[in-house]
Image: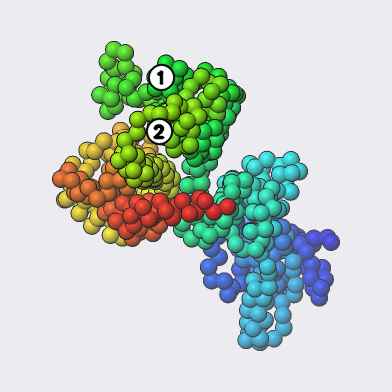
Amino acid sequence: MTDIIDPQTEHAVAEDTSAGTLVHVDPHALILETNVRDDAALDKQFVASIQEHGVLIPIAAVQDNDGKLWVRAGQRRTLAAREAGLATVPVYVRAAGVGDDKTLLVERVAEQIVENDQRRQLTDAQRARGIQQMIDAGASITKVSKKLSLGKDTVKAAAAVGKSDTAMRSLAEGQLSLEEAAALTEFEEIPGAVSRLMQAAGSRRFEHVVSQLRQEKITAEAEAKAAQQYLAAGFTVLDEQPPLDPECVPLYRLRTAEDAQADESAVTDPSHWAVVLFESEGLADVETGAVVNEDEVDWDTQDDPKATPAAGLRHASTVTETIVFTPQYFCLDYRAAGMTPDERFARQTGLVGYDNPAGCPVDLDDEARQPERERIAAERAEAEKRERRMVLALNKLGVAAQGVRREFVKKMLARKTAPKGAAIFVADCLARDGYLLTGHNAAETTAELLGLDSAQSVSKVAATLAATADARAQVITLGLVLGALESRTLKDSWRNAATTNHWSHHVTGGDYLKWLAANGYTLAPVEEVIAGDKTADEVYDLHRAEVDQK
């Protein structure tokens, strides 16, 4: 269809006014009619899209008797085209209606409302599928992001979802948002993970569950790597500690041929041995990842990067906390290994008289008390095992919660103004705890939360604030306090939450977490322990129930 421009007026003229005509005109030549949309609400994403693609759907306009074009539908497209600097835009032109002012007003408003109402947006699933098609066709994440005027994170999320049937189905059914569906794709292969995520979907708990699953995944991968090393060496790797069994005897219950207590030096032929890997927290070299004994570290250097460690020791900055898996050995064939079970194990498993000499003197009273002693010992061992497992589990939950919490605080401190009540909280904290800002790692943590690279950067930012930047100054002051409190809130703070009222810690971790919760943050269960709302045992039992569901 041919565009017609009147050379005398430089206005586009419709060739066939009864049917309408498509023309291309300068967006600045268009006149905006009064619109029911009283706020165009242009955003950067929309303007960027217009700049990238131009106006794809023609603007609808009516032409008056003077040849002027009045925008009937397409107010936002017109304004965005002007802002984007487009030379021309497509316009579908019709002749103005006939009638009195009221009749024309009714016609205009009706068309504007219908034009905005009678449309259906793409669903998130449809958009994700389309993005995946673009990527499959060879488009890069960057190119798709530019073409669609979407953030790269959104495009990456859509691409991840597009590859997963489970995520796409959950997205299409409205069970998950795009971001939630993308997170689900990380854990599809982990038993029970999808169920845990679906239960938390749509709530503020979702981020915590994702963070917890990431920690669990790290642990599982570390355990699998450790297990593979023992398998490669010829050992049998057991998933859990076996019950009393003469065909699987713990190393510490064995005696050597010289009747000495067996130790790891007796483990010479892997084919005779099985291992159970027990998780614990240890230290590793920052660069190599090799396990380091804590006795090899000069802990006096911990707060001084320039300090020289004592002879034979290493600087504290060269190690980091890590997950360590240590083996407990079980002999699968003690005869072939040249050893004998100790008398107690032999009695417990019915081996007395088989590998042990008969006629040993027996204290009958002691024999009668033995079952009770063994029961008490077993209960004590089980309680100790539960305590160890609880410490490990809740420490991991503490690490997971820390990541989510810090992201929340970073977003809060990125705002132009501090949240309501922040000044009162800051004043209360500083009045109660004069040493708050001098704590270990307080300055470094503050810098991290403010998005700066060092504690010195915080000072520079504060020193260069404009005279009118009171609002930003309040945010930075809040950051100093939150950074100090965050530096005190460690992965194991749940263990001593009840003792944080020590004289030097007047402001407790519970105070900090409760203030965050009052400002929109959702506490993770382990943080509820610190806040005093739950007990460690309650959280551990709940966590075990979630992890054990398959």
Which colour style is shown? rainbow
Q: Secondary structure at mark 2?
A: helix
- Evaluate whether residue 417 shows in this view: no
Q: Which residue is mark 1?
A: 259
Q: Is residue 115 above or below residue 311?
A: below
Q: Which residue is mark 2?
A: 344
Asked if the residue under mark 1 is in contact with the one under mark 2, i.e. CB atoms within 8 Å, the reply is no
Q: Is residue 339 left or right of residue 271?
A: left
Callout 1 amino acid: Asp
Q: CA distance from mark 2 to mark 1?
A: 14 Å
Residue located 79% across and 62% down the image: 4
- In x, y percent, where is residue 470? 28, 51
- In x, y percent, where is residue 309? 29, 17
Q: For residue 489, which quarter of the picture?
A: top left
- N-term-proximal mark, 2 vs 1: 1
- Evaluate whether residue 41 shows in this view: yes
